[in-house]
Amino acid sequence: MSRTALLVLADGRFPAGGHAHSGGMEAAVASGRVRDTASLEAFCRGRLHTAGLVAAGLAAAAADGYDALLLDEAADTRTPVPALRRVARRLGRQLMRAARATWPSADLDHLAHHRPEGAHQPVVLGVTARAAGLTPLDAAQAAAYESVGGPAAAAVRLLSLDPFDATAALARLAHELDTVADTAANAARRAAAEGVAALPAASAPLLDITGEQHAAWTVRLFAS
Amino acid sequence: MNVTTAHPPTENPAPAGEPLEADGGPHGRRPAGPTPAHPSGVVATARIRATHNGRTTTVPLLHNDGPFHLRRLRAHGEQARVRVLGAMSAPLGGDRLALDITVETHARLEVTSAAATIALRGPTTVPATYDVRVRVGDHATLHWLPEPLISTQGSTLHQTLAIDLAPTSHLLMREEQLLGRSGEPPGHLTTRLTVHRGGRPLLDQHTAYGDPAPAWDGPAVLGTHRATGQLLLVDPELDTPREPRVICDDPAQGHAALTPLADPRALIATAVAPTPARLRHLLDTALTYAYETPTSQGLS
């Protein structure tokens, strides 16, 4: 309904705790896999089409009114490493707190009641979008943007990259981001008839392996 | 070798470097439905069914089809063993291959392959499909340990693995993917792995490597590694929560993580490596850790 609601939800200043997470960027920088703007862009593109696509599909389905608890289970089956499941639930819990204060709704209360330890963040994001009167495509767009916005901001801090360069890299991904959001929203529509198997399940081995490695670090700048 | 024995000569005509573009369908699209995509494509479904006769496991159904030749091997105790021979190494463009494995109540079966499965372009750019469907019954065990799948330049293969387990089933599965032969860029390879346990989803993963998959060789997905694989162990007796293990965190030599799924009775190892030998080493190490008891893990 309100275009502004989407801006509020997707704003990095929305108090949902996302700034403490690098989406795997800290591990990628530490191993030397990301060291400049070009490798930053390649990282973000890879994350967008894997973790970002999965998150966008879950968010779109949740915004479409699909059973959030089944989506939470679907998120678990798409997240093979426990470190990333913990991160997703922690972020979900933080988003839930901000969302209930911002757009109170029975759907958010229901999910919070059944997942007191936190539901997967993209599921909470989708239910939040619904509460804010947004469409499944809006929810997919927000999830897809978040999947690259966080890592790009983290790379600026970790590598002292020029923020203009990092932002330009994000802008170059805009078209692919739209495509991912469209794909996710279409999959969410199919899920209504075919079940959660219709939702994207794209995986990235390095994000999984290094996500688990990073969780074991004793000193780190980002929580993930 | 296996390629030529697998397909009748007429199906393997491609003079070197002479792509028959005119016969190809639309690029990169998987035709809907079960209709064969291309006249030269092989449509074949091989079937294996193992059952328990009260004393030991027997394999009453071993149905060869198309490129699949199945052979019984000498049993290991109560475990029957079947090897997939020969033409497994040749999904060519347009092929529609399927392998159904059913392990009935109390049966114990191991299925291996004799050689790597090699996805080749063949005479057409039409995608090939290879669907493995597995059902494991109550108190039954399947070890599905094929040799690697190699995606060669110019090939397109869409692979699915659909595994349906009973709550009391045991499963050990290893899958390895090699992206391109030595010094060669890979073809396009997608794999959807879905595992259900007691009717509930346990694991759902989709990978896409090789052009046109976006950023598959970038720092979030495979980086510089061209060998990747997984080991999945489902064991209803795994009731103690297992700590994740990171294996060999020297990025240049590849690395792996062995972790419990959300259902703690399943452990998965995901590995990436620069070479097939390193990949196998990582997955073998993961298997050793997976079979360690939590006590011995604490002592090590």
Image (cartoon, coloured by chain):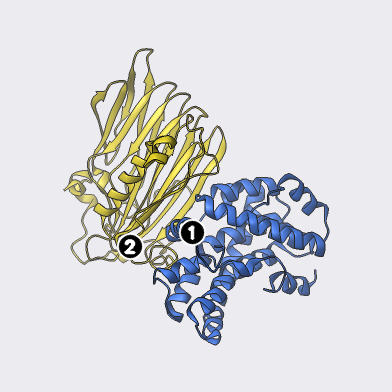
- Helix, strand or loop under label 1: helix
In-front residue for pair B177/B152: B177
The residue that disc 2 covers is B225
Quadrant of the snapshot with the N terminus of chain A: bottom right
What amino acid is at disc 2?
Answer: His
* Gap between marks 1 and 2 measured at Cα: 17 Å
In-front residue for pair A85/A158: A158
Estimate the x, y position of residue B255 in percent, counting from the top left.
36, 56
Chain A: colour as depicted: blue
In-front residue for pair B131/B176: B176
Is A218 rendered above or below residue A9?
above
**Is residue B89 toward the left or the right of residue B127 in the image?**
left
Q: Which chain is yellow?
A: B
Estimate the x, y position of residue B224 in percent, counting from the top left.
33, 66
**Is residue A44 toward the left or the right of residue A57 in the image?**
left
What amino acid is at disc 1?
Answer: Gly
Using the image, tell me which numbered label, if any, was put on residue A211.
Answer: 1
* Foreground tag (1 vs 2): 1
